Amino acid sequence: MKKVHALKWLLTGLMAYALCVSVHSQEVLLTGRVVKVTDGDTITVLVPSGVMHSNAPITQHKIRLQGIDAPEKGQSFGKASGHFLAGLVAGRDVKVKWSKKDRYGRILGTVFLDNREINLEMLQAGFAWHYKKYDSTPAYAKAEAEARVARKGLWRDEKPVDPQTFRATIKRKKGRGKDGKKVFTGS
């Protein structure tokens, strides 16, 4: 009898563990209102209470649109990219599918407005690069390629510089190496 009871507890524990592991590895759906568009690939969403395991009346989450990299504010098409994204989502209720955060604590997610995928629309309009270093979504690669051919958005520029290269150039101009550490330039 004791063995059966112990076996029941063991099975219950294993099932609970498996459930926790599967919940943590699956995508989470967050729903809220966009209150800020930082740039062409980052937004802030306010989420009502009871969502995201919070007891706060409203929680604020910074969302980095996964799979795309938009021009920086000081870069060609940086402002246009941010304005385009704002035109799509500012003040609107969105859903964000996500499963992890980046090194800055931002949620990496796919943003949906009604049934429209906003990350994909940014690529289709030519206001972002497909961030191939971190994403392999075929539809994103195709959308970027089609925007390039049609010379939409930033692809109108003769020699567009991707944001990663732009950021690295800025760091070097500020006396930092590729790793972001200060470079000794004096004698």
Image (cartoon, rainbow, N blue to C red):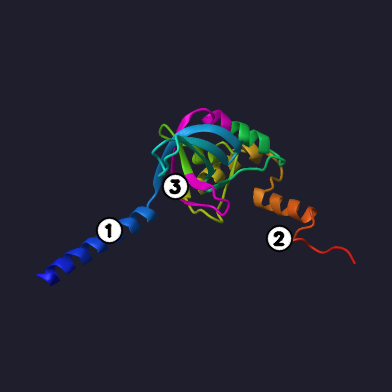
Q: Position of residue 129 (x, y in %)?
A: 59, 46
Q: Which residues are magenta?
A: 85-109
- Please tell me whether mark 3 or mark 1 is closer to you in this view: 1
Answer whether residue 85 is visible to the viewer in this image: no
Q: Position of residue 149 (x, y in %)?
A: 59, 42
Q: Is residue 134 left or right of residue 171?
A: left
- Residue at image coords 71%, 54%: 168
Residue 20, relative to residue 148: is it above or below?
A: below
* 3 or 1: tag closer to the N-terminus: 1
- Disc ID at residue 178: 2
Q: Is residue 89 magenta?
A: yes
Q: Tell me the residue that label 3 is attached to.
A: 98
Kindly identify the amino acid type of the residue bearing the numbered disc 1.
Answer: Ala
- Residue at image coords 40%, 42%: 29
Q: Quadrant of the N terminus?
A: bottom left
- Disc ID at residue 16: 1
Kindly identify the amino acid type of the residue bearing the numbered disc 3.
Answer: Trp
Q: Badge 1: few (under 14), some or many (20 or more) residues near its Cα, within 10 Å?
A: few
Kindly identify the amino acid type of the residue bearing the numbered disc 2.
Answer: Lys
Determine the CA span between mark 2 and mark 3. Answer: 29 Å
Residue 35, relative to residue 135: is it above or below?
A: above
